[in-house]
Amino acid sequence: MRGRHGRLELFDFSLPTKESVEKVILIQIECNLNIPSPELNDRTPYEDIVINKSVSNFFNAFPFIKKMPTFKYYQRMLPLSEKEFAYKSVYSKTGGVLNIFNPKIREGVDSELKKLFSQCEDEKEAIRTWKDASSELWSNLPPKLVWACGGKIEGELLLDFLQYLTRKVRRKEFDTLGDSMITAIKYLREWQFISNEICSGMAPVNAIIEERKEIYERKSAFLQEMLIETDFV
Amino acid sequence: MPKNSLQRYLAKIKNDYGTSLTEENYRDIILEELKSPPSLLDYFKDFMENNKTKLTLEWGCLMFLFIKADEEKYVPDIEKYYKLLERYPHNWFIEIAMAELQLRYYGNLFKAKDGFLKGLELKPDDAHCHYNLGYVYHLLGVFDKSFEHYEKAAINYQTANRPKEIKARSLHNLAVIKINVEHDYEGGERLLKEALAVMPKYPEAKRALKQIRW
């Protein structure tokens, strides 16, 4: 689609913009950080980095990451600082596969949060309401699930969607950026409801939400155990 | 505004489109350009009446040039005349044209959504705005709002340029949401039949109905 091609592990794929190619990489990293591994004593990289307050242990456990072209993106996203636990950190998340074509969201465009801040006297109360409410900015995902990020299933579904889209747009020509974006998003909205083997026949949208809920619960419990305060719990 | 800008606009309109705009005729010429559908003409009659003290010959020139740029789909001029028209009361036509540009040319769903919402404020119950909002919310993955707007487009379809088409397409898109999101196949089938009753030669609706019956 307009010559924006990327290479991800085993296959080439086509996406409408350079930004969406970059987002694919960031989604993969977000998902990887939530997958527990024996190398980290069954902790997720996220948990390991928070416990050690450093990325060294994680990079030592997976030395190949440093040699990958995507290493600079890991460096950009890590280590996890205090900011990770504040409500504002949601705007640094991708929103995952369901939001792959969305532009970067800034707090300034979050009209729901703005409205709640003006309605509630207590800022914390406004954030508590906001984090649970479905948001137009992220395909109806609530901010807490955007913050939680995806995991193993979403990572696999990402590759599945890229293959699906690449098959669908093969040899298609587009007149405008809008044309290619709309086409890609239409295929995304179609794909998200098609029963998928990766998630045992569930529709990807439901599997993604279910997995994010599980990750959210795990993260919440972990942060509570670590006595780390966060706006998202 | 400097007088020479007005002279430039008048000369451009005369040279490029063979039309002489004057203080006396510019209102009628703009209404002639926007006469279809009748609801658009009615809207502009009201708009001009309600803003008669604020609209000038310069507005008439800019509006004329905006309409032509929109017909020609020439993006730099659409954006240029929209910016120049911003100092005058906003109207439905320019907001919608810009929202469509954001959607179809740039693929910016959030800006398009804001534009269509603004259009709806300027022309409440407008089927065209509701239909496009249904479409944009669908692309945004916000299906409850998409459904809400397609429903309103199907109800207010008479205000649209091609009323039957807007109604049939809204019903078809409602059916798609019923089937995909709510897994309500009966509801979907009913809506598809309604869509086909309005527009019998509608391949997408026929195809969807066939798929349901499998």
Image: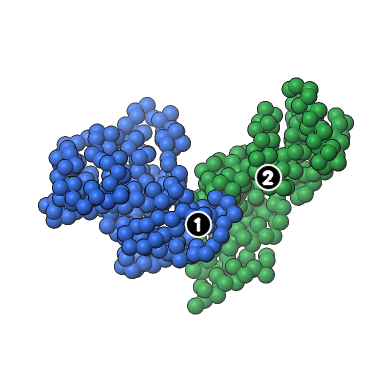
Report the residue marked by disc 1: A1
Mark 1: secondary structure: loop
Question: In the image, what residue occupies the spot 33% across and 33% down?
Answer: A125
Q: How is the image coloured?
A: by chain
| Residue A146 image position (x, y, % from top left) | 34, 46
Q: Residues within 10 Å of mark 2 (few under 14, many from 20)?
A: few
Would residue A92 be found to the left or right of residue A3 on screen?
left
Residue kind at label 1, given as amino acid type: Met
> Secondary structure beneath disc 2?
loop
Position of B199 with respect to A210 (left or right) is right
What shade does chain B have? green
**Which quarter of the rendering shows the C terminus of chain A?**
top left
The one of B142 and B14 positioned closer to us in this rendering: B14
Chain A colour is blue
Residue B72 visible: yes
Q: Tell me where residue A223 sits by quadrant.
A: top left
Q: Position of residue A171 (x, y in %)?
A: 52, 64
Q: Which residue does the image show at 39% across and 61% down from the upper left?
A: A12
Indicate the chain on which mark 1 is placed: A
Q: Which residue is mark 2?
A: B74
Expressed as whole percent of the image width and height from the top left, the position of residue A49 reads: 18, 42
**Label ID, residue B14:** none
Residue in view at x 27 percent, y 51 percent: A68
Q: Amino acid at mark 2?
A: Tyr
Q: Quadrant of residue A222?
A: top left
Q: Decide which of B29, A223 is in the foreground and name it.
A: B29
Q: Is residue A27 something one can see in this rendering? A: no
